[in-house]
Image (spheres, rainbow, N blue to C red):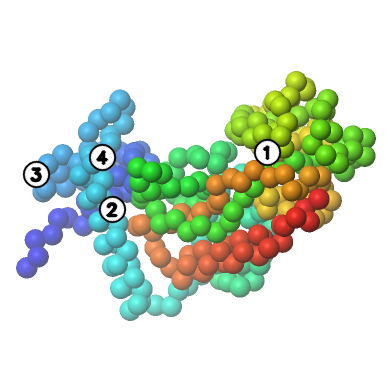
Amino acid sequence: MRHLPPLSALRVFEVAARTTSYVEAGRELGLTHGAISRQIAALETWLGQRLFVRVGRRMVATPAARAFATEISQAFDRMTTAAGALGKLEAARLLRVSAPTTFAMRWLIPRLSAFEALRPEVEISVTTATTLHEELRGGFDVAIRRGIGRQDGPAWPQHRAVHFLDEFDVLIASAGLLRQHPVARPEDIRGAVLLASETRPGDWADWLTAAGLPQPRSRHRVFDHFFVTLQAVTDGMGFGIGPLPVLEREVQLGRLVAPLPAIRVERPGYHALIPFDVDKSPSLEAFVEWLVDEGKSSATGSGDGAG
């Protein structure tokens, strides 16, 4: 007979290693911190070695434990797939999606009715992250984040990443502001109020470089988050730098104008991130495929006609 470690302890260990937090693992699994500690200790006793070490106030998985967790995640995936092949047809279910706030408000949510029409049995719950690179801590079936891989390894080692949308930054403004301050060439923004965000500190510098302009001596107004800056741009308080195709509907509806669409700064694209241990249900796979299709459609519709 196979001499297997306790499966309940393996489940707890995989979640704790993925979330890098006993507290977060407890929240995801509905267990107390003490229960998490006991399960980890039982698995360490069975294996005969430490799996976590204390770093400050956190328990961090050792390199060997992280590699072990990846193998365990993949094993759970295979068991889930095998069970699904023999199990019941999928019933109505909740699909939890985590996405950056602006992306969720301006790109994802306006399109969700199309997915719901395709899969009416699926209920989508969207939670938002206030920054593009907010740490992934579980509690979702799929997360949407912007980024690229790193030279020292995958950007999201505990997740399968599916790229579905490219992004580039352009100059944006309200139609009312452009009537007062027309812009036909980059030099025309001199003397204008430039609106910036703490969460996107390099946007103006990168765009000005792409436009061949020096760093400005114009007035700056800086807001804490981009979705606040975006509202200020929509209200005509000044010029901003905004992402397309995320804001393509705002441009199509006339709420925003991209007066110089040919001057653009390429940004890392968006990925759907699926935890290795999550239930790979038909609903989840359908949602990811839908994101890819919507990304292709969005890229086609946000060409040089943005202005």
What residue did someone put label 1 on?
A: 210
Q: Is residue 11 visible?
A: no
Closer-to-camera residue (276/27): 276
Say which amino acid is labelled 3.
Answer: Gly
In this rendering, which labeled residue sits more in front, label 3 or label 1?
1
What residue did someone put label 4 on?
A: 61
Residue 295 image position (x, y, % from top left): 61, 61
Callout 3 secondary element: loop
Say which amino acid is labelled 1.
Answer: Ala
Look at 19% across and 41% down and name the residue there. Answer: 51
Q: Is residue 232 visible?
A: yes
In this rendering, which labeled residue sits more in front, label 1 or label 4?
1
Q: Earlier in the sequence, mark 3 or mark 4?
A: 3
What residue did someone put label 2 on?
A: 70
Q: Gap between marks 2 and 1, in whole Å?
A: 41 Å
Q: Earlier in the sequence, mark 2 or mark 1?
A: 2
Q: Gap between marks 4 and 2, in whole Å?
A: 12 Å
Look at 15% across and 44% down and name the residue there. Answer: 44
Q: 133 above or below 92? A: above
Say which amino acid is labelled 2.
Answer: Thr
What residue did someone put label 3 on?
A: 48
Closer-to-camera residue (108/141): 108
Closer-to-camera residue (256/125): 256
Asked whether the beta carbons under mark 4 and mark 2 sit within 8 Å of each other, the answer is no
Residue 236 image position (x, y, % from top left): 84, 36
Callout 1 secondary element: helix
Q: Earlier in the sequence, mark 1 or mark 4?
A: 4
Asked whether the beta carbons under mark 3 and mark 4 sit within 8 Å of each other, the answer is no
Q: Gap between marks 3 and 4, in whole Å?
A: 15 Å
Q: Earlier in the sequence, mark 3 or mark 1?
A: 3
Left or right, residue 288 beside residue 61? right
